[in-house]
Image: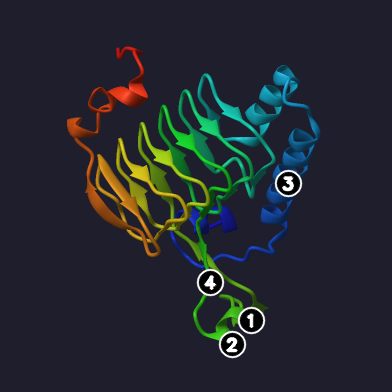
Amino acid sequence: MTEEEKIFAGQLFCPGHPDLKAMKLRSHNLCTKYNRLFEDEAEERNALLEQILGHKGAGCFMQGPIFFHYGSHTRIGDSFFGNYNLTVQDDALVTIGNNCNFGPNVTIVTPIHPMLPDERRLMRNEKGEPTRFCYAKPVHVGNDVWLGANVVICGGVTIGDGCVIGAGAVVTKDIPPMSFAAGNPCRVIRPITQEDSMVNMPEILAGNGLY
């Protein structure tokens, strides 16, 4: 089993293995190229995103700077908007649905390190060789999700369709669909309902219409 296959199997893997280091270096270098481009260099930016990501849907825009650890382990749907400083440490798979909006400084982190200090420093591989290990859990973000500024999503979390996650939340557990959730640790505040429609805020709607 390769080190990458171990990641996807949820097993301990060696992040310093040459194969994984090569994948990460490729992504880091491509992200650096992206971050050096001007915002209106749209064609060049889009071409780089096609190389960085495992899948990129139509209408995908990332303000930049962006930071993808592997890149190839991230799949993003259609009509995605990512604000400044999007960071995705995608050791495990990260899946983001359609019509998602991420505020500034959103971070998705999939790897998990051993809790005990000596195990974080070194363990022994199947050959008895001292090795630094970690493991990772996938993240799934559903369709039509809005993440506020500075949201952190931890490994193993699923955020359901239609959710709004408040600014500064640290999401450590699954969030059911159509929920407003916030806090550290993040918790569901209430369901999102038709009572939240802009129709009920005419002073903000200001004569504009709805679909």
Residue shown at the point (31%, 54%) measured from the top left: 174
Marks 1 and 2, how far apart in space?
5 Å
* Residue behind mark 3: 28
Q: Kindly check if marks 1 and 2 are in contact, taking CB atoms under 8 A apart as contact.
A: yes
Inspect the image, locate mark 2, and give the three-letter code of the amino acid beneath it: Asp
Left or right placement of residue 4 versus residue 30 in this view: left
Q: Please state the horizontal and vertical placement of residue 108, each as a whole percent of the image.
A: 51, 51
Q: Earlier in the sequence, mark 1 or mark 4?
A: 4
* Residue behind mark 4: 113
Disc assigned to residue 121: 1
Marks 4 and 2, how far apart in space?
11 Å
Marks 2 and 3, how far apart in space?
29 Å
Looking at the image, which residue sits at the far bottom?
A: 118
The crowding category of the residue bearing disc 2, from other C-alpha atoms within 10 Å (few below 14, some 14 to 19, many at least 20), is few
Marks 1 and 3, how far apart in space?
24 Å
Q: So how many labels did they put on this image?
A: 4
Is residue 122 visible in the rendered image? The answer is no
Is residue 180 visible in the rendered image? The answer is yes
Q: Kindly check if marks 2 and 3 are in contact, taking CB atoms under 8 A apart as contact.
A: no
Inspect the image, locate mark 3, and give the three-letter code of the amino acid beneath it: His
Left or right placement of residue 116 versus residue 174 in this view: right
Q: Quadrant of residue 146?
A: top left
Residue shown at the point (48%, 23%) measured from the top left: 79
* Colour convention of the picture: rainbow
Inspect the image, locate mark 4, and give the three-letter code of the amino acid beneath it: His
Closer to the camera: disc 1 or disc 3? 3
* Residue behind mark 2: 118
Q: Quadrant of residue 3?
A: bottom right
